[in-house]
Image (spheres, helix red, strand yellow):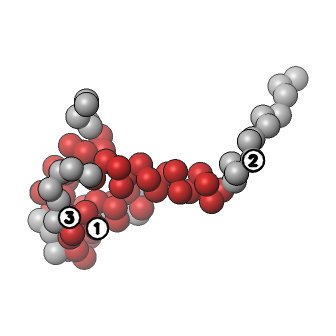
Amino acid sequence: MPQPLALPVGHDSATRHQRASAVPAAALRGHGLTIAERSALLDCYATPDRTFLEIATTHCVDRERLQELWFDLFLTPSRR
């Protein structure tokens, strides 16, 4: 029978949420994005059920540019 996993102190949902939200923010650093592009990308990350067109329209960003950024930054990140 598998043993229950003992989580260290401070390993609660708030900590996991903070770590998860740091992932997209870290991926956006150093790419010279506008505020609208950054907001749209974070919106894509936070609401995967919405289309690129909906999010691009909401943030006044070109849909094609948003999709290119999304795939470049999150799906095929550059190796550093």
- The disc, 1 or 2, on the residue closer to the chain's N-terminal end is 2
- Residue 79, horizontal then vertical, whole percent: 25, 30
Marks 1 and 3 sit apart, C-alpha to C-alpha, by 5 Å
Residue 73: which quarter of the image? Answer: top left
Q: Quadrant of the N terminus?
A: top right
Residue at horizontal 25 percent and vertical 31 percent from the top: 80
* Residues tagged 2 and 3 counted as in contact (Cβ below 8 A): no
Depth check: give the residue in front, 24 or 59: 24
- The disc, 2 or 3, on the residue closer to the chain's N-terminal end is 2
Q: Disc 1 marks which residue?
A: 39
Can see residue 56? no
Depth check: give the residue in front, 26 or 42: 26
Q: Secondary structure at mark 3?
A: helix
Question: What amino acid is found at the position of numbered circle 1 in the picture?
Answer: Ser
Residue at horizontal 22 percent and vertical 74 percent from the top: 59
Q: Disc 2 marks which residue?
A: 9
Q: Compared to 73, does 52 lie above or below?
A: below
* Residues tagged 1 and 3 counted as in contact (Cβ below 8 A): yes
Q: How many marks?
A: 3
Q: Disc 3 marks which residue?
A: 37
- Residue 17, horizontal then vertical, whole percent: 56, 57
